[in-house]
Image: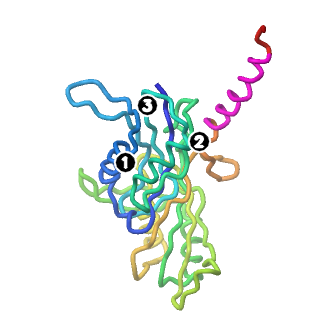
Amino acid sequence: MQRIRLRYTKRGRLRFTSHRDFQRAFERALRRAEVPMAYSAGFTPHPKVSYANAAPTGTGSEAEYLEIALTEARDPEKLRLLLDESLPAGLDIVDAVEARTSGLADRLTASVWELRLDGVDPAEAGRAVAAFSTAEAVEVQRTTKNGLRTFDARPAVVQLETHSEPADRPTDQPCAILRLVVRHVTPAVRPDDVLSGLRAVADLAPPVPAAVTRLAQGLLDEETGTVTDPLAPDREAVEAHSTAEPTAAAKAPA
């Protein structure tokens, strides 16, 4: 059995697809691409696909991850291209690597998000960010299946800062761009919780819903506040194995 780890995106209108919608689309893509999938046992076998920490419905993402199990070995890059061609534009398979390590989910400890606040003056957003960052606690509320829950969103936020509008995207309306690094904790602190916190501490209320995109997720480097590529250990293990094979062949007796 071979395991392949994939990174995929949710772009444009496809950000409104739910996780279940993506699962159905991905399983159709597996059939179209004739991927030799391994299946679970039991009366209703399912293809062995493991999803990790999917983004909320309505948010875009450049960094979603999953793992598939195959009954026959395949070249990861060729498999990526086949699956990408079988999915609608916006759900794009952008990276693939053979799984050579364990614990992919354990390496997804933080996310980097971009929040585009159309109609919000960057200076106003900067003051709100400063108020949030200096607050000892920022209590927010979220409706759950067990009712309304109140929790502190502040400890999970590693970084929150404003960014300038890209020069190639001019607009007549003010627009604030926020960059957010947040730890994956329980309960999960999502970008909309941070927006609720900004409203609570600084009365920041965008006139239109924020456009939210996950830029990265992976292991949090506590010293730098950066998020590392979770597929890097697998790539390094594959490269080490490829390097070791010629060496072993050279040492083999004639």
| Number of the front mark, 2 or 3 | 3
Q: Is residue 238 above or below residue 10?
A: above
Task: Indicate which disc, 1 or 3, sits on the residue closer to the N terminus.
Answer: 1
Return the x and y of residue 61 as percentages of the image width and height: 48, 59
Closest to the observer, 246 or 10: 246
Front-lying residue, 147 or 192: 192
For mark 3, what is the residue?
70
- On the image, the x and y values in percent for residue 113 come to 53, 61
Sequence-first disc among 2 and 3: 3
Q: Amino acid at mark 2?
A: Leu
Tell me what residue is drawn at x 38 percent, y 40 percent. Answer: 34
Residue at coordinates 38% horizontally, 63% vertically from top-left? 14
Residue 238 in the image, given as x and y percentages of width and height: 64, 32
Q: Which residue is mark 1?
A: 29
Stretch in magenta? 234-250
In the depicted structure, whether residue 156 falls above or below residue 124 = above
Camera-near label (1 vs 2) is: 1
Local secondary structure at mark 1: helix
Question: Distance of mark 1 from mark 2, alpha carbons?
Answer: 22 Å
User: Quick one: label 2, few (<14), some, or many (20+) residues within 10 Å?
Assistant: many
**Mark 3: secondary structure:** strand
Query: What secondary structure do most residues of the magenta stretch adopt?
Result: helix
Amino acid beneath label 3: Leu
Q: Which residue is mark 2?
A: 231
Q: Is residue 125 magenta?
A: no
Q: Residue at x 53, y 91 (%)?
A: 172
Q: Amino acid at mark 1?
A: Ala
Image coordinates of residue 123 in percent, x first then y, are: 59, 82
**For the residue carrying disc 1, how many other residues have a C-alpha within 10 Å: few (<14), some (14-19), or many (20+)?**
some
Q: If the image is split into quadrants, where does the C terminus sit?
A: top right
Of callouts 1 and 2, the N-terminal one: 1
Q: Nearer the viewer, residue 243 or 203?
A: 243
